[in-house]
Image (spheres, rainbow, N blue to C red):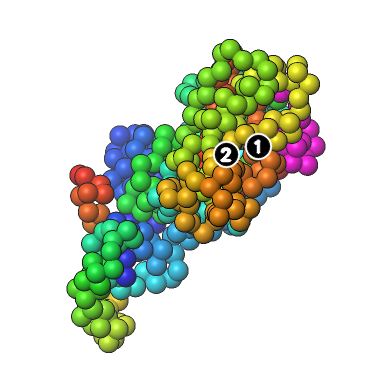
């Protein structure tokens, strides 16, 4: 799980660890300086996605997540 | 995901087409590159003939790319290096691959730092690495291309391009950041001798540093007063070193160094004075910056608002070199803090 601003970094790090198709679940950035209630809401938003990732066969997940593109939010990098 | 960088580019491609190809794939720093043709890479490898092209020098995070001699040479070609620069590039990469530099964190941090390569010893003069006027600026091939080669390695082999490098703003040193110490103008021992190397050895010291901040002192010649001016610029409430210390850098101007030495001060005296003066009271620091971070020094009494917080844990942690041209300025280069420390590596050639 990672915030949008760091999703490409998570992907490269996973690749470096030999897990190029690691499932990455993304939440809106930022998280670090938010209050507890907002963080809880973020968790609830991705809970179902996390359950799916944890209960889906790895081979199927690999096909879904290998080479997936995670665009940086415009607030971080306007294009 | 971008494909692995190829070993060479087809020499028949026009310069513009090669540059577009590389730029589209994120293999540049935004500036034009020299196409790394097989012939150019081989010529670059001849700069270190004792090493096999497939020799592994480092594994570069976060992608954990394999920085072989060939891959480093390709990036050095792209940067515009001459073959005789290669030992400096390799030594700098070896330095930042040491655990105390904390490369994985530096590659992915939000902090605005870049690997500053400080060159000491005979090779600085041989390669014409600028140590005097304008040393942080343009016009000197070695300064411009050695630092750039290291950065291209970090981008291309380490995978820390713009989408991955989380530095909030970056700084111009991420294009290139390479200087030499002005040893002839240094009234004391140069950095590499201070660190235990022979004067005749060529050594690189690499420290992850922010952009240089100019400190003007055109009036005072008393060393204590010069230090007071510096301390005010160094121990600011926003500087990382106030919260996690580490190895910040003072680039002492040659005129300031002359005044200080003429008064009988040693380099150690400079460090000790700044260790004592470059501080802020805990009462001002405690609810700002990174004062709640994990590296805040234990030596500060957090029950006493008057307890003074230093920018280094001990005087010898401050890196002091002498460089630059004529004028009443010295430079302060803050660093990230104790999570990334400087590393010195000897070069294989003299």
Q: Give the extent of the magenta segment.
A: B184-201
Dividing the picture into quarters, in which one does residue B9 lie? Answer: top left
Main SS, magenta residues: loop
Q: Position of residue B332 (x, y in %)?
A: 54, 31
The residue labelled by disc 1 is B276
Q: Is residue B251 left or right of residue B243?
A: right
Q: Are marks 1 and 2 in contact (CB under 8 Å)?
A: yes
Q: Position of residue A48 (x, y in %)?
A: 20, 80
Q: Quadrant of the N terminus of chain B?
A: bottom left
Q: Nearer the viewer, residue B71 or B248?
A: B248
The stretch drawn in magenta includes residue A64? no
Q: What element does badge 2 sit on?
A: strand
Q: Position of residue B266 (x, y in %)?
A: 76, 28
Subunit of mark 2? B
Discs 1 and 2 carry the same chain letter: yes
User: What residue do we see at 70% from left, 41% from top?
Assistant: B316
The stretch drawn in magenta includes residue B198? yes
The residue labelled by disc 2 is B279
Answer above or below: position of A64 versus B164.
below
- Crowding at dot 1, Cα within 10 Å, few <14 / some 14-19 / many 20+, comes out as some
User: What residue do we see at 25% from left, 83% from top?
Assistant: A51
Answer above or below: position of B108 versus B83.
below
Q: Nearer the viewer, residue B24 or B172?
A: B172
Q: What element does badge 1 sit on?
A: helix
Q: Position of residue B183 (x, y in %)?
A: 70, 25
Mark identifier at residue B205: none
Q: CA distance from mark 1 to mark 2?
A: 7 Å
User: What residue do we see at 41% from left, 63% from top?
Assistant: A13
């Amino acid at each position: 799980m990672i915030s949008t601003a760091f999703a490409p970094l998570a992907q490269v790090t996973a690749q470096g660890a030999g897990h190029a198709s690691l499932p990455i679940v993304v939440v809106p950035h930022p998280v670090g300086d938010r209050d507890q209630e907002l963080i809880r809401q973020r968790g609830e938003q991705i809970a179902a996605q996390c359950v799916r990732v944890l209960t889906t066969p790895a081979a199927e997940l690999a096909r879904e997540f290998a080479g997936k593109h995670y665009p940086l939010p415009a607030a971080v990098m306007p294009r | 995901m971008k494909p692995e960088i190829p070993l060479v580019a087809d020499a028949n491609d026009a310069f513009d087409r090669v540059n577009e190809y590389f730029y589209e794939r994120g293999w540049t720093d935004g500036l034009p590159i020299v196409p790394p043709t097989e012939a150019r890479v081989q010529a670059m490898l001849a700069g270190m003939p004792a090493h096999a092209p497939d020799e592994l020098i480092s594994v570069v995070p976060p992608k954990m790319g394999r920085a072989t001699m060939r891959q480093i040479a390709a990036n050095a070609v792209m940067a515009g290096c001459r073959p005789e620069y290669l030992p400096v590039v390799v030594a700098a990469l070896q330095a930042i691959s040491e655990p105390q530099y904390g490369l994985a964190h530096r590659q992915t941090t939000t902090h605005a730092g870049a690997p500053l390569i400080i060159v000491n010893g005979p090779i600085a003069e041989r390669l014409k690495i600028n140590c005097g006027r304008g040393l942080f600026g343009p016009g000197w091939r070695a300064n411009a291309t050695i630092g750039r080669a290291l950065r291209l390695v970090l981008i291309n082999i380490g995978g820390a391009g713009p989408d991955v490098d989380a530095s909030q703003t970056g700084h111009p040193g991420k294009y290139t950041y390479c200087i030499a110490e002005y040893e002839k103008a240094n009234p004391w021992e140069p950095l590499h001798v201070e660190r235990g190397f022979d004067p005749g050895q060529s050594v690189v010291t690499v420290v992850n540093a922010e952009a240089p901040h100019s400190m003007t002192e055109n009036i005072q010649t008393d060393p204590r007063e010069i230090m007071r001016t510096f301390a005010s610029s160094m121990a600011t409430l926003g500087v990382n070193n106030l919260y996690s210390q580490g190895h910040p850098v003072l680039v002492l101007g040659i005129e300031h160094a002359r005044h200080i030495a003429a008064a009988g001060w040693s380099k150690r005296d400079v460090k000790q004075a700044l260790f004592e003066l470059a501080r802020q009271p805990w009462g001002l620091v405690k609810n700002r910056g990174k004062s709640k971070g994990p590296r805040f020094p234990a030596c500060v009494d957090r029950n006493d608002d008057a307890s003074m917080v230093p920018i280094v844990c001990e005087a010898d942690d401050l890196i002091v070199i002498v460089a630059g041209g004529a004028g009443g300025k010295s430079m302060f280069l803050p660093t990230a803090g104790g999570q990334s420390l400087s590393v010195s590596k000897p070069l294989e050639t003299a």
